[in-house]
Image (tube, rainbow, N blue to C red):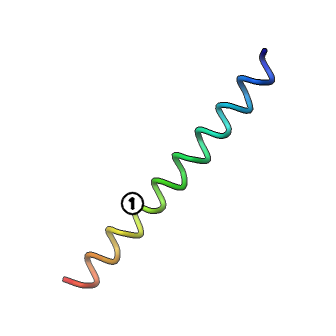
Amino acid sequence: MRDKNQVYMKKMLCKNHILYSLGLFIMIIRRVKI
């Protein structure tokens, strides 16, 4: 059970990191465009 939890947490962290990176990327593009 503990191992499964760790894998799930890692997957969530990975997803959050990708979403955060995308958000940051979009913010930078908007700043450059304006």
Work out whether 14 lies above or below 23. above
Type of the residue with mark 1 = Gly
Q: Residue furthest bottom?
A: 33
Q: Position of residue 16 (x, y in %)?
A: 51, 46
> Which residue is the extreme one toward the left?
34
Task: Work out whether 28 lies above or below 20.
Answer: below
Against 15, residue 30 (above or below) is: below
- Image coordinates of residue 33 in percent, x first then y, are 25, 84
Mark 1 closeness class: few <14, some 14–19, many ≥20 residues within 10 Å? few
The residue that appears at 28% across and 83% down in the rendered structure is 32
The mark total stands at 1
Picture quadrant of residue 9? top right
For residue 33, side relative to residue 22 (left or right)? left
Residue position for label 1: 23
Asked where in the image residue 30 lies, by quadrant, the reply is bottom left
Quadrant containing the C terminus in the rendered view: bottom left
Residue at the location (56% across, 47% down)?
15
Q: Quadrant of the N terminus?
A: top right
Residue at 81% over, 23% down? 3
Please determine whether, in this image, residue 25 is positioned above or below residue 3: below
20 left or right of 9 in image: left
Question: Helix, strand, or loop for circle 1?
Answer: helix
